[in-house]
Each structure stands twice: as structure tokens, then as C-alpha cells.
Amino acid sequence: MKSLSTRRRHPLAAFVVLALGLAFAGTLFAAFVSPAASADTGESAAQQLANGKALYISSCSSCHGKNAEGTGLGPSLVGVGAASVDFQVSTGRMPAKQLGAQVEAKQNIFSTQQIQDMAAYVQSLGGGPQIPAAGQYAYDANAVALGGQLFRENCSQCHNFAGEGGALTDGKFAPKLTQTNPQQIYEAMLTGPQNMPVFSDKVIPPAEKQAIISYLLNSRNEPNYGGAGLGRLGPVSEGLFIWTVGLIALLLCAVWIAAHTTKASAQKAAQAAAAGKAGK
Amino acid sequence: MTATTPHAAGFGDGTAPSTPAGKAADYLDQRLGIAGAAKKNLRKIFPDHWSFMLGEIALYSFIVLLLSGVFLTLFFTPSMNEVTYNGSYTPLDGIKMSEAYASTVNISFDVRGGLLMRQIHHWAALVFVMAITVHMLRIFFTGAFRKPRELNWLIGFGLFVMALLEGFAGYSLPDDLLSGTGLRIAEGVVLSIPIIGTYVSFFLFGGEFPGHDLVPRLFTIHILLVPGLILALITVHLILVFYQKHTQWAGPGRTNENVVGLPLLPVYIAKAGGFFFLVFGIISLLAGLVSINPIWTYGPYVPNEMTAGSQPDWYIGFLEGSLRMMPNVEFNFIGHTLSLNVLIPALIVPGILFTGLAVYPFIEAWVTGDRREHHILDRPRNVPTRTGIGVAGCTFYGVLWVVGGNDLIATHFHLSLESITWAGRVVVFVGPAFAFWITRRICYGLQRADREKVLHGREAGVIVRSPEGEFSEVHAPISDGDRYRLTAHDVHRPLSIAQAADANGIPAPRLRRAKLRARFTRWYFGTRVEKPSTEEYRESITSGHH
Ligand code: HEM
């Protein structure tokens, strides 16, 4: 296990600290002002809702409807909650572009502020799960083992034992979890995007969600103790490796050994062959 | 060693050995009289060719398996008793698991050199089965299984099956999530056997799955029973290679009656010893640099847990694929469920594949009516039907194998699981047929190219222009040795019905069999590329078509 001091240098650390700071300030402010207000810029709740609505109308309403009631192109957003909007937009899934088997993550095009505005707007329409506070998804070294167990019970059948992702039916897939930030992991569990089930707080209480996140963060940073990890995909990549690199190396040795014979014995063999009397 | 040989050579001429080794040999010889036998056997000739060393790779990786395996038995606990882990791999701290799993994690993190040994053992296992497979393919495609080596083919086949069993048993021992999933599938396969399935399963697992008995039983099978059988079979296998002598490629001076090569001692032994260290070295390098079976990331087996990417080691992958490909067919028959969806892919398909493999030498001998001994290998192109059958078999196996990894193919190439499965269902039938057809055509093409080479020489790459302005390529004559090599093979002909019946008068029931057999040989040898006859060859020389 790594101590916090080594983790500090991880590329993610700056981000975690930043998110932590922002969200901490946010929750503090929210506790004092109103549940849906944002703290960072001191926008009023009403302003935020107005901004959020404007953004929503221009970017989202074509599919989700003017009042988020849903259209043929996208589901209703009433009651999906701020957490769902934050997850969908911050992972770049929304606004959706081409609709294939599954809307895929891509580059996010909105600022954090804009996302929060839209989230607040959608939240105001019918409630739903809120964006989690930073403390809820902070790394907890003591929860890693529990998190591993919970991950194997609830998640690995789709996302693979190391969070490397896996295939589902009809061209859908459970993505890799190696890049997703902790807040998004929390929100994914809370809202169950597309083919992922919802893991409500009744099914997996907040402390256990935090444990799962701690496990995933730990496994990302864990070295492959045995050497190159071959993508952490299990026996298939091992088999592929032995039938390519391993076999070629062994065959090269065989060819080399078979071709190298001391001159003297090769000549003798050649003479014997010429005389046609060798062996037997 | 150097002293033994001259002494043995000069046996009885009164010269006393002077070196210590020579004296020791002399001492032993005077008591055991081994010089005569040793001289004969140690000078045994082995032909040199890289493809004759594939069996050796299997042998050496087996030795590596034995050595590393003994190390592992010292630290592994074959028990399903539940313990709470508190070793040095903290991400599993406080987790309940079987002693088998806990001891494997301990070997990986708390036993000095343990992880390296585990990885050597596991990579060696993959190399072992791969080497056996490739060795077997070389025996098949060169016709080395023909009389008198059919029995050795059967022994080899036995080794192949034992190796698969041994690998599966070993893979199942650590009781991690993947091995448990594998055993669960094995249980399903046993259960699918009609009528007796349930009883057999209870018998094997000692009650309900997973139970407490299986891991200790697998342990005995894995470290005692199967390795013992493999060792015994390898011994017989090599004794037979030794006494039947090794086959060789056709060439000047190499006939069906002799063996041309290097003496076992000192040349071949030195080479073999060197090769052992190379194989050992490559396996160790792999084990030191590349992770294999990191069971601590899989977690302990818990029956209600599952993971994406649950696959067996490569040599069981074809069964996995066969299961994944099979449509879901189940019948209910007077209170019994007949699970064809498991029975067919997991027992019937491999049953047919393996039986076919085992009896192929006998089928070929019957079809071709060839009763002669063969010590000269076939070039695969010269027996197109056999080569085609072999490639078709490999294609069939390969399709099953690929579908065994369908989920990874789906995620890595952005395909849907269903389309891969459906493609597999079609290709598994069409692919082998196509492979057979195209392989035979390629073989005939290569034979024709050989014929051209014999008659007109090889293309020298020089273009000349005749005084009439015609362009033509210069053909350089090939050497006598090459000409011999290209024409040493027999051109087989189909049997007539009379030959097929092996009898003078043909009684009616036999006639039907004879007709069948004649039809088979026509299929086997119907299309031929004849070797150039002497007349053709003379004519090609005199007409100056070089
Ligand atoms: C434990 C596995 C095996 C080991 C250690 C092994 C070892 C060997 C060795 C060292 C040789 C002599 C060198 C060579 O031709 O490569 C040999 C020959 C032979 N093996 Fe194997 N083998 C194994 C499995 C098999 C299998 C699976 C088959 C076929 C079903 C097979 C069939 C034969 C035959 C027919 C020969 C004689 C080849 C000839 O004279 O050209 N062996 N084996």
C-alpha cells in the first residue's frame, strides 16, 4: 500500500485536490444558502437556473424537449437529478452526437460552471440524486479491501476484475474505469447510465460507494507485481503472447541450434552421407 | 566423456586409460560390461532439422515444470478451509478466503522468489502445451506417424490429452475467481451428461459444488497422478523414438534404410543440453518480465461473483469458444433435462475432434492401402489431401479458439458480441471446407512449380532478347541434390476395387466395403501432379529449354 505522500505526486492528485476544494466550498455554501445554488461565482440561485435553462435550451432541448419532457430522440430528464447531468455532460456523453448502440464518452465541451448550471436547472425540474460532495468519494486507504470485495460482487461481471471494461450484448459495452474521475464513478453508481444498473444508497450505502472508489483508485496505481501486465485482461492476452513472442523466440533457438554444427562433425556427416553408409 | 570414446573404440588392444574419467569408465566397464552397449547406443545417429527439435521443447519445458512445481508444493496448502487473510498484500486485508487461495497469495508476496517460481511454472505450462501441439502438427504434416510409428503417435496423443488435464487441474488449484469460474463450467459440463451427470458430479466434487473435497483431489491429480503418467509415457515415447530411429528428410544418400545425421554422443547431447538451457532461459525471461495469472487482482472465488474476461488458459480456450458459440438448446425429457447446449459443445465436439486426431494414422493407412514402412518424411505439398485435412482441422480449432475470446474481440475491435458469435457459427463450418480446398490447390501448385524446376531449372532472373526480338527468361539448371530432393517422393495412385478388397475373389459384403474404400482413395489421390518421367527429362535437356 502506498502512503499519502507518494500518492501526492500522482497526476490525479492535483485534480483531486482541486475538485475537493471546489466541492468543499460548494457544499459549505449550499448548506448556508439554498440547496441548488452554486458558490464559486456567487451567482444567485435564480441566475443559475436562468443560465442553466438557457444552456439547456440551446444544447439539449432538441433531443430532450423544451421542458425536458423527452422526445423521440432522448428520454425525459425530469427527476434524473443533478448527478446524472453532471455525469453525462462531464464525461462528454451529452450532448449526444451520433446515436449508435451506446452513447460513448468523448471530450467534454462545457465548463464546470456551465455543467453545474444545467445540473441545477434539471434538478429544479423534479429532484433526483444530487451531485455528491467531495468527502463522499475521497480516497480511503482502509476501505480498499472492502471495496475490492464489493467491486467483485457488483461490478466486475461487466467491467472486468481490474476495471478494464468488458463487452455486453448488441454492441454495447461496459467502459474501462481506469480514467474516470472519482466523482464520476460515484455518479455512475448513483444514476446507472444506459445499461448500467442503478446502485442506489439502499443497495450500496455511501460508505461502500466510497470503498469501491478507493479500491479502483488503488488498483490504478498498483504496479503489476509480476512484470508487464499485458493489459490486465487475463489469460487471453497471456495465450496470445506465448503464441507470438514465446513461439518465435523458441523457434529461432531451434533453427539456430539445428543449423550450427561444428565444422568437423558436419564434414564427417557429409562424407558418411556421400558414402551412403551412415547410421543404422 | 572424451576418454570413454577412444577407449571404447580401442577395447581389448591393451591400452590402459590415463585420465580419471577414463579410469572410472574402465572400472565400471570391467564390472558391468556396458562399453559395448554404450558404444552402439551413444553413437546412435540423429538427423538435424529444426522441426525435429519441437518435441525437445516439450520435454525441456516439462522438466522446468517438474522443478518449479516441486518448489511450489512446499508452500501451497491444498485446502478449502476458510481463513482470514492478513499477509502483506493489503488490498486483500481481512478478506475471507480458502487456504488454497491464501497460500497462493502468500507464495506470491511472502515467499522469497515465490512469485518468480509461480510465473516460471505457469509460463512453462503454456510453453509445454504449445510445444506439444506444434510438435504434433509437425508429425502430422510430415507423415511421421506412418508405419511403424503409429503406436508412438498414440502415445503422443495420450501425452497431449494428459497435458491438457494437467494444465486444467493446475489452473484450478489456487481457488481464485477465474479458476473457480472454470470449475463451475466444468461442473456444468459434467451435469450435462445424460442420466448419470448428477451422480458423477457428486462423486467428483464430493457433494455440492464447490465443496471441500475438490481442491485436495485436484492437488493429488496435479502433482502425482498425471505427472507420473506423463513421465511414464514420455519414457516409452522416447524409447520408441530411439529404437525405431528418427525419420529424416529425403536427400542424396538418405534412404528409407539409413539415418544420416550426427551421433548422439557427443554432438547431439551437447546440442540438446544447450537447447535445454535456451528453453529454460526463455521461460525464465518471460517469468521475470511478464506477469501471468495475477490471482491477487482476480480475488478469491465466491460462487456469486463473476468477472468480465473470465477465460481459461489458451489450451482450454477452444472448449470455451465451443460453449460460447452453441445456440441455447435444451430439452425436457420425462423429468430429465437434456442440455444439448452444453453436451454438444463441451463433450461431443471435442470428442469427435480428439478421436479423429488419435485414429488418423489408421484411417490414412486404410484409405491408401499403404502397408510399407516409412522413414523418409513427406513434404506437406506432396500429400495434398492430408495437408488439406490438417489445415481444415486447424481452422476448425482456430475458430473455436477465437470465439472463446469473443468479448475481448468485441471491445477491442468495436464489434457486437452477437455478430462475432454468428460469424463464428458460420465460419466454423464453411472455414474448414474452404481451407481444405484452398490448401489442396496450393499444394498442387507447389508440386507443379517443383516439376517445372526439375525440367527447366530455376528462374535465374535474367531476361534475354533473341535475335528475333523475343524476350525470355534464362533458366539455370538445379543441382543434382535438389533434383533428387524434388523427385524422391512417391506419386500415389488410387486403389482399384480389387486392390481395395485385399482379396482375390470378392464376396458381396466385402465388395461394398471395397467400393467405399476405392472411392476414398480416389478422393485422396484422384488429382495428381506426376513427376517428370525420364523421357520428359531427357527431352527437356536436349531441346535446350534451360
Ligand atoms: C509430453 C509431450 C511430448 C514430448 C515430451 C515429446 C517428445 C518427443 C521427442 C523429444 C521426439 C524426438 C524429436 C522430434 O521428432 O521432435 C518425439 C518424436 C515423436 N513424437 Fe513426440 N513428444 C510429445 C508429444 C507427442 C504428441 C502429442 C504426438 C502426436 C500425437 C507425438 C508423436 C511423436 C512421433 C510420432 C514421434 C516420432 C517422430 C519421428 O521419428 O519423426 N509426440 N517426441
Image (cartoon, rainbow, N blue to C red):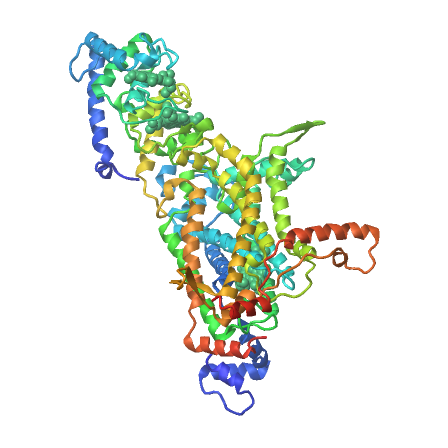
Q: Position of residue B151 (x, y in %)?
A: 65, 60
Q: Position of residue B70 (x, y in %)?
A: 48, 56
Q: Is residue B165 left or right of residue B364?
A: left
Which residue is rendered at x = 64% and y = 56% of the image?
B361
Which residue is rendered at x = 63% and y = 37% of the image?
B343
Front position in the image: B32 or B135:
B135
Image quarter where the N terminus of chain A lies is top left
- Which image quadrant for residue B43? bottom right
- Which image quadrant for residue A180? top left
Front position in the image: B465 or A62:
B465
- Which residue occupies the extreme bottom position in the image? B14
Q: Is residue B229 visible?
A: no
Q: Is residue B187 left or right of residue A48?
A: right
Compared to B524, does B423 lie above or below?
A: above
Compared to B296, does B156 lie above or below?
A: below
Q: Position of residue B7 (x, y in %)?
A: 51, 85
Which residue is rendered at x = 32% and y = 40% of the image?
A222
Image quarter where the C terminus of chain A lies is bottom right
Compared to A146, does B136 lie above or below?
A: below
- Which image quadrant for residue B470? bottom left
Q: Position of residue A57 (x, y in %)?
A: 27, 11
- Which residue occupies the extreme front position in the image? B468
Total marks placed: 0
Front position in the image: B357 or B476:
B476
Which residue is rendered at x = 39% and y = 19% of the image?
A200
Q: Is residue B242 visible?
A: yes
Compared to B405, does B475 lie above or below?
A: below
